[in-house]
Amino acid sequence: MHYRSTRGAAPILDFEAVTLAGLASDGGLYVPDSWPRFSHDQIAAMAGLSYVETAVRVCAPFVGDALTEAQLRDLLTRAYAGFSHAAVTPLVQLDDQHWLLELFHGPTLAFKDVAMQALGLLFETFLGRSGRHVTIIGATSGDTGSAAIHALAGRDGVEVFMLHPRGRVSDVQRRQMTTVLAPNIHNIAVEGNFDDAQALVKAMFNDADFAGRFALSAVNSINWARLMLQIVYYFYAAVRLGAPDRAISFAVPTGNFGDVFAGYVARHMGLPIDRLIVATNENDILHRALSAGDYSAGSVTPTASPSMDIQVSSNFERLLFDLAGQDGATTAAMMAGFESAKALAIPAEQRAAAAAIFDSARIDSDGMARAMRWAQDKCGQLLDPHTAIGLAAARASTATSPIVTLATAHPGKFGDAVERASGIRPTLPPRAQGLFDREERYVTLPATLAAVEAHIASIARPRAAA
Ligand SMILES: *Cc1c(COP(=O)(O)O)cnc(C)c1O
């Protein structure tokens, strides 16, 4: 399998290179050069397979010869061994039409662990082959940073510097990062907001001198391998509910469009998905894009579902590329227009193609709280705010197929918001208890490039001389 950029002007890469590269050098995102396709019989044969075996089948065509099947199986087995549920991503029935797919049984209580736990092992495996070493730099508003840190702690060949906005992530989120004391993990609290932290990371990648001294890498949601690993649970869930003989819909609490794009790929691969329901909070750029063709960035409104508080949805470019007939030049022109005007009108033909698959809904804080109370009163299920937004969108849908709402976080991760909306204080599961007793380690730095680069340079290992 080969990968090319959505903007058509970056080198073609294989799976190993695309995993380590993250963003393409032309500013685009890597996508496979064709969608692998499973027959009806191949999907039917997934019935009864374990999560890991399902993952081996779904990932193998994308991995190509970068790993043997035995290596892939070993890696995925190790990735999911630490999950707290034997099914890895169990389904929970709510009523005759609605199910939850619980994606929060990993170490940091949010769905990002599902991909990140395996990505950490892919990095270690691929870097180990060549004895290479990378410096991973990221900015986080909470969930991505903690998932990355838990996946990369103690791994050979990687040094991790994670920036978070000081005082602007929840106590649980901060402690999930700062109590990891592995020597290759370095947390930096930046005196600024998330945008400041993210701007610093971009500036370091764009600083040719700094990026030249350290082999910089990223594990953010544009990494293709993360998307690939998220395709698995669409197959796992749909097959359990009757696919390939019955079409299933999915409602997805959406921010950067990574999780729902994985569902779109599953559909390309032959999984009978009826509707993909994109659920947004008040930060509704994707709802406006899909319902009215208006992809225009505003300012971010803070909500009770912070992991969906986004202005620009980075993975949406992958959909635009596919809808534009996989034409890199067209996509590059669209994205250049968006980057200068902060707005993009999606052409009617592409809107129609998207509407054949996607529905969308904007759920405000009242709608979120109502869905949370419905699940509590009718099903005895306490939901986190992100999941409640997904369920609200699912319940508003006109689809008649079974609808699976992706439960993207454990309610205990967002305890204050859940208590405000439902009146119930969620508890943290046993694997996260003790978080408040552990020692924390992090440095606080001003939001300046000079301060952050000097700190990283004092610790990171310089690139080996050529
Ligand atoms: C990251 C995140 C989302 C959004 O997922 P995208 O792939 O960015 O669309 C939703 N819910 C939770 C809890 C998350 O951490």
Image: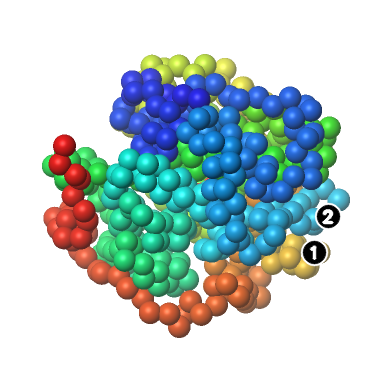
What residue is shown at x 45% (from left), y 26% (from top)?
3
Q: Quadrant of residue 358?
A: top right
Query: Could you tell me the amino acid type at mark 1?
Result: Cys
Residue at mark 2: C-beta within 8 A of ligand 1: no
Rendering coords of residue 176 (x, y %): 45, 68
Q: Earlier in the sequence, mark 2 or mark 1?
A: 2
Q: Which mark is residue 95?
A: 2
Rendering coords of residue 15 (x, y %): 45, 32
Side of 231 where 38 appears, left or right: right
In the rendered view, tell whether residue 389 sits above or below residue 417: above
In the rendered view, tell whether residue 212 sits above or below residue 406: above
Label 2 crowding class (10 Å Cα cut-off): few <14, some 14-19, many 20+? few
Q: Residue 279 or 34: which is nearer the viewer? A: 34
Instruction: Assess whether mark 1 and mark 2 are in contact (beta carbons under 8 angstroms).
Output: yes
| Label 1 sits on residue | 379
What residue is shown at x 50% (from left), y 36% (from top)?
67
Rendering coords of residue 144 (x, y %): 45, 55
In the rendered view, tell whether residue 159 sits above or below residue 16: below
What residue is shown at x 58% (from left), y 62% (from top)?
82
The residues bearing labels 2 and 1 have C-alpha atoms spaced at a distance of 8 Å
